Amino acid sequence: MSNIRCIIIEDEPLAVKVLSDYIAQVPFLELQATFKDALLATDWLRNNNTDLMFLDIHLPNLKGWLF
Amino acid sequence: MAYSTGSIVLFGIARHIYNYTRLRQAEQQLRIQKQEAELNYLRSQTNPHFLFNTLNNIYSLARDKSDLAPESIMRLSKILRFTLYEANGKYIAIEQELKIISDYIDLEKLRYDESLRINFNYDVEDMKQALPPLLLIPLVENAFKHGASETRNRPFVDIHLSVKNRQLLFVVKNSTDLNEEDQNIKENIGLSNLRRQLELLYTDYNLSVLRDGSVFTSTLKINLASHV
């Protein structure tokens, strides 16, 4: 079975740190990129694919639940 | 006979006046107690989100054994001590409120990257000037909560306090999200809470909020001599 590719969308740097540390501890998770807001993630997703998103609900401008 | 009737009537009147004034005094006392209870209640509504967010940030710092972890715990402890013990009193020295604001700012900073710009300055003639506790911090809280954290590009918070001739001027400016659907300023709980406290404490004050494009400004003016 191949790894699950994932991205993080979270505006607080310290939370990103904790999440990426956790992801690094899970052998079948592969972190592709992190974004500090949903609009930056949208740009990236135009040309890239991912399997899983860790998406914050409270984000500047575009909220997680509207994404 | 006429004399005794007269004296009974007189006694009755005197008694009535006595009871009446006693009642008025008790009523006045009760009103003051009620207002004090309300003020304490308004002050006790510290934001539980702030506590939760800060603890999460400290957790992250502690995982990395960051030097910021111990000082952040100390700052949080100072804020809690202040709101638990000091803020129950009627007054604090203005310098205490300023210290709490700067501790609060340092803890909020943890949630942002380097792009956040903060300016905090003050010009206070008497740092021991008495001020009711937790009167200024709600506006700082709002600047972060509804402003900087909603801004994608170059978030900022500008805070300025001046006290001259017992005239207090507190101006908080912050960036906000331009694309927010409604341009109308909705007064949140923090702001209406502050308004109620001002109403109970002063007769001469002004609290105004203004939005100009992506800049939000709240201005608080108090004539400290107008304390009730």
Image: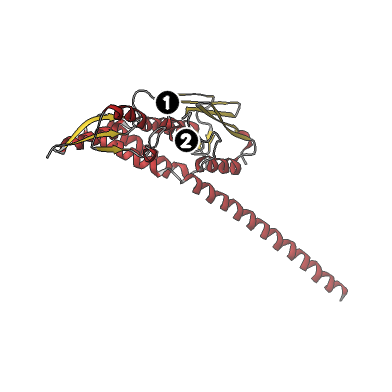
Residue at horizontal 60 percent and vertical 42 percent from the top: B199
Chain bearing tag 1 is B
Q: Residues within 10 Å of mark 1 (few under 14, many from 20)?
A: many
Pointer 1 residue: B155
**Of marks 2 and 1, which one's residue comes earlier in the chain?**
2
Residue at horizontal 57 percent and vertical 53 percent from the top: B34
Residue B118 position in % (x across, y down): 42, 24
Image-quadrant location for residue A59:
top left
Badge 1 element = loop
Residue at horizontal 54 percent and vertical 39 percent from the top: B186
Badge 2 element = helix
- Of residues B44 and B14, the one nearer the viewer is B44
Disc 2 to disc 1: CB gap under 8 Å? no
- Of residues B21 and B142, the one nearer the viewer is B142
Between label 2 and label 1, give the one nearer the viewer: 1
Image-quadrant location for residue B9:
bottom right
Q: Is residue B80 visible?
A: no
Q: Say which quadrant the N terminus of chain B sits in.
A: bottom right
| Outermost residue toward the bottom in this view | B1
Question: Relative to B117, is B190 on the left or the right?
Answer: right
Q: Is residue B63 visible?
A: yes
Residue B38 position in % (x across, y down): 54, 50
Question: Relative to B26, is B189 on the left or the right?
Answer: left
Amino acid type at mark 1: Pro
Q: Residues within 10 Å of mark 2 (few under 14, many from 20)?
A: some
Q: Say which quadrant the C terminus of chain B sits in.
A: top right
Chain bearing tag 2 is B
- Of residues B157 and B5, the one nearer the viewer is B157
Residue B3 position in % (x across, y down): 86, 72
- Of residues B115 and B88, the one nearer the viewer is B115
Amino acid type at mark 2: Asn
Pointer 2 residue: B142
